[in-house]
Amino acid sequence: MAMLEELPANKTPKDIMEQVIQFIKQFPTLPLHYCRKDSKLLYLEPGLSLSKMYTMYTEDTAINHKHVSKKIFDKIFHSLDLSFNNPRKDQCDTCVAYKQGSVDSVSFQEHIEMKDRARHFKALDKELAAENDTLKVVTMDMQQLLLCPKSFASAVYYKRKLSVHNLTLYDLKSKDVLLFVA
């Protein structure tokens, strides 16, 4: 007598789990600005939450009435290396490593001294530019990647969004700003 292998009643079928994974992967993600090479986490848009995603998921699957519980949805989400906790301000790798205890205090102190020296020379260059019309001192910043359009309507989350890069150049003397958006 052959025994039929059946899924336990509380086990989520693989096709339903794959459906959840595909649903979650529809949302656009962003890497960290400075720590891209060291972090495998991708971040979802600010304003989106796991609860909002689950609500959209249940609305999306309401037709066939086959959806997973919030607990299973959360578990699948966290297995995909995604997060909502995009840091308010990215920090350099050395500062983050020091806070985590993986950089010794001597190396960190050297790092801080180099940072302070760079700021000092920037201030000197700014003073020189103020005195000399033939000298131009410019700073630049590559802004964090932005997704457009920014909307919290569920239908927009399923669409491909435009990734916007913004390089800013700032003249320290004239205070002129140039933006290069791509």
Image: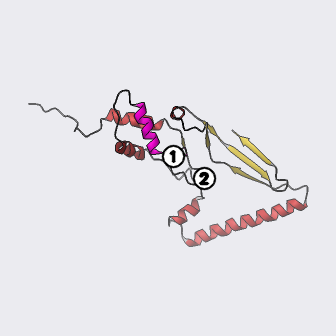
**Location of residue 98 in the rendering, given as x and y in whole percent from the top left corner:** 54, 66
How many marks can you see? 2
Disc 1 residue type (three-letter): Leu
Label disc, if present, on residue 42 of the rendered structure = 1
Residue 80 vs residue 75, the one in the foreground:
75
Label 1 neighbour load within 10 Å: few <14, some 14-19, many 20+: some
Secondary structure, mark 2, is: loop
Q: Which residue is mark 2?
A: 34
Mark 2 → mark 1, Cα distance in angstroms: 13 Å
Write the residue at 71% across / 40% down: 181
Residue 169 placement, left or right of 72: right
Quadrant assignment, res 6 = top left
Residue 38 vs residue 175, the one in the foreground:
175
Write the residue at 37% across / 46% down: 75
Secondary structure, mark 1, is: strand
Residue 155 vs residue 126, the one in the foreground:
155
User: Is residue 46 on the magenta stretch?
Assistant: yes
Task: Please state the extent of the stretch shown in magenta in the rendering.
Answer: 45-60
Residue that extends furthest to the top in the rendered view of this protein: 63
Q: Choose the circle earlier in sequence order: 2 or 1.
A: 2
**Magenta stretch: dominant SS?**
helix
Label 2 neighbour load within 10 Å: few <14, some 14-19, many 20+: some
Write the residue at 25% across / 40% down: 10
Label disc, if present, on residue 65 of the rendered structure = none
User: Is residue 92 on the magenta stretch?
Assistant: no
Image quarter (top left, top right, bottom left or bottom right) of the N terminus: top left
**Location of residue 157 in the rendering, given as x and y in whole percent from the top left corner:** 52, 35
Residue that extends furthest to the bottom in the rendered view of this protein: 106
- The colour scheme is secondary structure
Residue 10 placement, left or right of 37: left
